[in-house]
Image (cartoon, helix red, strand yellow):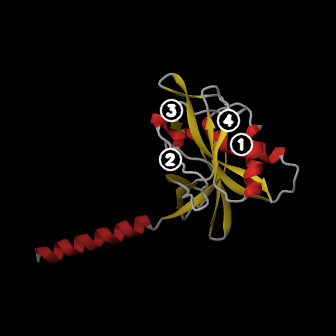
Amino acid sequence: MKQIYILIVFLMFLVIFSSCNSKYSTQVVAVDRIDTSGIYFSYTYLEKNYTGHFGLNEIAEDFSTSDSLKIKIEKDQPDRYEFISVVKRVWKTENAIVSTVKNNESGVYSYHDVDQKPLFADADNEFENDSLIFDYVKRQSNSSNEFTKVRVYILINETGKVTLKNAMTNNKDELVSIKKIVEKFPDFTPAINNNENVTVSYLIEIPIAK
């Protein structure tokens, strides 16, 4: 008899839990843009489009515009949502020209491992770096709006000067274009670690005209 009672209680708990859990839907959404006021994204629920926004202080994890956000949406009020986690973009590496191994013994730090990240020209914080770099490169191009994105590792030294470390493409024309673009980059505000300016390796996306 006691076992039957325990079973009934357990089943009631499952029903209640399922009922509560079914009030929400989870989605992985792309980041539309990042600026000083926060992170903006859009999503679709039941064929209706919504836009969302989180303040920069609401997400403690490192992320960039190429990453996504996992959110929880209220089914009865789809315009209400909660942050769950950052979903890191997985980069394919089959086109990498040079090994991207980085370590502190060589005096080069990972972009995400320093106390204060480098800042691109006009950036107020590190969350603006990716979008500002991308927009800067597009403005420098006089070609059509059709472009392909190429992942590039750049080195930003102790004075903020930028050099190309490697580009993940086997296309020689793209590589030539990337070298010219990086050579014209304005200086960054240098990265700081342990109260000293340091060199960092930074993975970015560069738009190359098709």
Which amino acid does the dot numbered 3 rest on?
Gly
User: Is any atom of residue 180 visible in this view?
Assistant: yes
N-terminal-most mark, 3 or 2 = 2
Query: Can you give x and y, in whole percent of width and height, for residue 23 in the image?
Result: 48, 65
Which circle's residue, 1 or 3, is located before the other in the chain?
3
Q: Which residue is mark 2?
A: 101
Cα separation, mark 2 vs mark 1, equals 23 Å
Distance between the Cα atoms at labels 1 and 3? 24 Å
Name the residue that disc number 3 marks.
Answer: 107
In this rendering, the label closer to the viewer, 1 or 3: 3
Relative to 108, 149 lies left or right: right
The image quadrant that residue 184 belongs to is: top right
Q: Quadrant of the C terminus?
A: bottom right
In the rendered image, the quadrant that contains the N terminus is bottom left
> Tags 4 and 2 in contact by the CB under 8 Å rule?
no
Q: Which mark is residue 133?
A: 1
Q: Which of the two labelled residues, at mark 1 and mark 4, occupies the earlier sequence position?
A: 1
Q: Is residue 20 above or below residue 52?
A: below
Q: Residues within 10 Å of mark 4 (few under 14, many from 20)?
A: many
Label disc, if present, on residue 162 of the rendered structure: 4
Label 1 element class: helix
Instruction: Kindly check if marks 1 and 4 are in contact, taking CB atoms under 8 A apart as contact.
Output: no
